[in-house]
Image: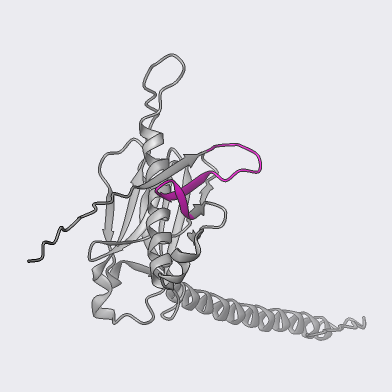
Amino acid sequence: SWEFTALLLVMTHSLKYFYTGAFNVQNFPEFVAVGLVDDAQIDYYDSNIQRCVPKQDWMKNNTDDNYWERQTQWLMGTQQTIYFSLGINHYNQFELLVSPSVDLPSVSFLQKSSSSPVSCHATGFYPNRAVMFWRKDGEEIHDSVEILPNNDGTFQMSFEIDLSSVAPEDWNKYECVFQLSGVREDIVHTLEKPRIRSNKSNDNKWIIVVVAGVVVAVVALLGLTGVIGFIIYKKKKNGERRIFYLSFTVF
């Protein structure tokens, strides 16, 4: 008879991610993410390169570009979430919660032409700790969005998305999401074609104005010529012998 003994080995592994936020530190990224498996670094991301990259050959050989693109999108979202959380959970040295005044933005959709990307534009908000991203069917689309100052002390930001390959009837599946520090609820706007502001109508208005200006200028020039001709005629009728030399140069 044979007797078999089965030995089952159970091995555990650990996956950890460390995030580092630094503000106003020279020559150091504002956000760094490092992934570790069993305390060995497997990937790296920071706010300067804005790309998640492998740090082990076996990770590189067993993953594809789609995996690293998903990791990048995830860490971009994590970066903005951490910025947002720091803004609403910050205490000063006196252990008092700082609650600055909050100004909500005016959000609109802009498009230069029918073939141009659609921009979600938020302006007039305060403070400048804000996050903006697109969302479709619950999936968030993140990118690096720059916050710019306005003349009145408020801020503005825009996030473009290319919908040239998306059918017009599917545009309303996209939402622009704006998150502002100090405001618990997200500001969400669904993309609807009637709400998109375009420069096309403004261009037509400028054409009308230019044409009207040219017509007025021509009428004024003809009127001026008629007045001068009348003056010359009257002076000749009165018997004056003065000679007038009039020169017109038209460009």
Residue 186 spot, x, y in % from top left = 27, 47
Quadrant of the rendered image containing residue 225: bottom right
The image shows a total of numbered marks equal to: 0
Q: Look at the image and tell me whether residue 125 can be seen.
A: no
Q: In this view, does 104 lie to the left or right of 220?
A: left
Q: Which of 162 and 120 is in front in this view?
A: 162
Q: Quick check: 236 above or below 55?
A: below
Q: In this view, does 237 lie to the left or right of 226?
A: right
Q: Magenta stretch: residue 160 in it?
A: no
Q: Residue placed at 78% from the left, 85% from the top? A: 250
Q: Residue placed at 92% from the left, 83% from the top? A: 243
Q: Quadrant of the C terminus?
A: bottom right
Quadrant of the rendered image containing residue 170: bottom left
Q: Nearer the viewer, residue 90 or 160?
A: 90
Q: Give the range drawn in magenta.
A: 22-43
Q: In this view, does 38 lie to the left or right of 32?
A: left
Q: Which of 61 and 137 is in front in this view?
A: 61
Residue 108 spot, x, y in % from top left = 36, 59
Q: Quadrant of the N terminus?
A: bottom left
Q: Magenta stretch: residue 36 in it?
A: yes
User: Furthest residue to the left?
Assistant: 1
Q: Quick check: 62 above or below 245?
A: above
Residue 45 spot, x, y in % from top left = 49, 54
